[in-house]
Amino acid sequence: MRPVTGAAYGMLFLLGLVLGVVGAFEHSWYVGDVPIAAFGWLLILFAVPYAMGRLMGGRLGAVAPAVGWLVSSFLLATRQPAGDLAIAGDSAGYWYLYGGAVAVAAAALCTRSSGSWLLKSPGGT
């Protein structure tokens, strides 16, 4: 069971990486002066780690995608040698990056541990 559990947490980390890459390029949609996409991403960044933590039955299930998101987002927010920057220093970028960090931390803290569904026997006993 340990390889299956490790693979599941690895896939959750990869899910977080994908969320970070997609969010880095899609967070800057505005409606007027309001960065509406960044606020939508805050909901997603709370909901996904929280749901994964609940499904896995512990905080590690929420922390794995959160760490993946943090790694990819903060790497994409740093200036590259060619001068490229995926997450700009505007209001949408600040809401996405710093609000997202608060959202994934809150999701990890709100997740209760009840035992992993991977470690339970198939008969429910």
Image: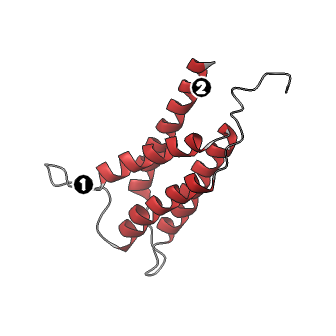
Q: Please say if 68 is above or below 74.
A: above
Can see residue 14? yes
Type of amino acid at the residue the image marks with label 2: Thr
Q: Nearer the viewer, residue 47 or 67?
A: 67
The answer to whether residue 56 is left or right of residue 44 is right
Type of amino acid at the residue the image marks with label 1: Thr
Q: Please say if 31 is above or below 39.
A: below
Which sits earlier in the primary sequence, circle 2 or circle 1?
Answer: 2
The answer to whether residue 96 is left or right of residue 107 is left
Identify the residue at horizontal 24%, vertical 54% (top origin): 78
Q: How many marks?
A: 2
For label 2, the residue is 5
Identify the residue at horizontal 45%, vertical 66% (top origin): 99
For label 1, the residue is 78
Residue 123 picture location, percent across and down: 86, 22
Q: Select label 2 or label 1 by which is in front.
A: 2
Identify the residue at horizontal 56%, vertical 18% (top origin): 3
Identify the residue at horizontal 72%, vertical 41% (top origin): 114
Crowding at label 2, few (<14), some or many (≥20) Cα neighbours within 10 Å?
Answer: some
Question: Helix, strand, or loop for circle 2?
Answer: helix
Residue 101 picture location, percent across and down: 44, 59
In the rendered view of the protein, which quadrant contains the N terminus? top right
In the rendered view of the protein, which quadrant contains the C terminus? top right
